[in-house]
Amino acid sequence: MSLTLAERVSAIAPSATLAMAGAAKRLKAEGVDVFDFALGEPDFKTPENIQEAALKAMRSGQTHYTPPSGIPELRQALAKMYSETRGLPTQDVQVVVSNGAKHSIHNALMAVCGPGDEVIIPAPYWVSYADLVKLTGATPVVLQTTEANEFKLTPEQFLAAVTPRTKLLMINSPSNPTGVVYTRAELEALADAVLKSDQVGVLSDEIYEQLLYGDAEATCFATLRPGLADRTITISGVSKTYAMTGWRIGWSIAPTPVAKFMGDIQSQETSNPCSVSQWAALEAITGPQDSVVAMKSQFTKRRAYVLERIAALPDVTCIAPGGAFYAFMNISAHLGRTLGGKVIGDSTEFCLTALSSAHVALVMGSAFGAEGYARLSFATDLTTLERGFDALERFLRH
């Protein structure tokens, strides 16, 4: 008798971003010159001071188990950082260091959600949100936002979706995939709406909080109203800000009882995050921040170039991102047209054909709950962006 799969696995799918990045890598392995705008990964090297901290940790024997929720030094530094720079009074017992922000989100959902619960997710959303909710047995309730409203959830939409089963609202600002940043006033209005219900909590994914453009402002959701911190789980990590995607360190700031159970879940599932990576993360958040400034400067230049090139593409529009490093392009005008010798029926066909015909890797909007769009990551150098846009423009014009 062969093994049978659990029913829960039928509810989830592989990550679309990783799938498209994998397809691009396979073409590259065949010798094809691919312009990979699929993966949300900074192309910069991890800063030298962070690498040196990791080497020092290894050489001094910091290569064994640590407490499941992270080394005390890192948890204390994060508590201090949130207390002093985010306006969120935090104790180290509220901090759980995990194997990346995605793992932190998983821990949070496992701790507070289960069968019969509902989790409100504004679309477009990061590809993993809905599947991570499904893994807990809870139901994702996807609320469509509009490009006309800059893909922002309104308090009225939220309140209309709340039921006796609603457990959480998931919010992400700056947003992946749109790059949209809620204003403080917009978040305050959502906070007021949340507080009208006694049972609804918030999971605030703030992983892109330091990658902002122009006058966009990062806001820690848990600080917006008295009592809100008691029902908010804040998520972040080092992957995007410090070019440390492979080091796999994220964290959560949660009410103490929730943090305890998140730590218990992690202790049974993975034990501690990588010990060496934790020491590297400690250096990242407490050491010199010059590298962050330098990376943001490059992203700012790339964003300007990308918006200029998108404006020149035929029948493609895009809201200027206020944060992160993505452009969420409206390609709906091309659905039903023939591109690369194929009639394009949806965003998946658009992206697959762009990859096979123009060798440009994008991620289909449907993966983010928004058909008719394609996400482009500008976490790559200007030369690659220039050549890639040349190829994309030829693809759309022929």
Image (cartoon, rainbow, N blue to C red):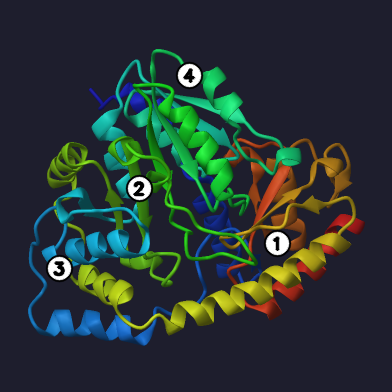
Q: Earlier in the sequence, mark 1 or mark 3?
A: 3
Q: Does residue 163 lie above or below 385 as drawn?
A: above
Instruction: Tell me residue 349's x, y (percent).
Output: 72, 42
Task: Give the amino acid type for the residue marked by disc 2 in the picture.
Answer: Thr
* Front position in the image: 131 or 278: 278
Nearer to us: label 1 or label 2: 2
Task: Give the amino acid type for the residue marked by disc 4 in the picture.
Answer: Val
Q: Is residue 37 left or right of residue 342?
A: left
SS of the residue at dot 3?
helix
SS of the residue at dot 2?
strand
Q: Badges 1 and 2: C-beta atoms under 8 Å apart?
A: no
Residue pictured at 39% horizontal, 28% vertical: 134
Nearer to us: label 4 or label 1: 4
Disc 3/disc 2 C-alpha distance (Å): 19 Å
Q: Earlier in the sequence, mark 4 or mark 2?
A: 4
Q: Earlier in the sequence, mark 3 or mark 2?
A: 3
Q: Earlier in the sequence, mark 4 or mark 1?
A: 4
Instruction: Tell me residue 298's x, y (percent).
Output: 60, 78
Residue pictured at 78% horizontal, 35% vertical: 345
Q: Quadrant of the N terminus?
A: top left
**Number of the label disc, if any, that sits on residue 73:** 3
Q: Does residue 9 lie above or below 319 as drawn?
A: above
Q: Is residue 89 left or right of residue 190?
A: left
Q: Does residue 317 lie above or below 261 as drawn?
A: below
Q: Quadrant of residue 228?
A: top left
Is residue 398 visible in the rendered image? The answer is no
Q: Quadrant of the C terminus?
A: bottom right
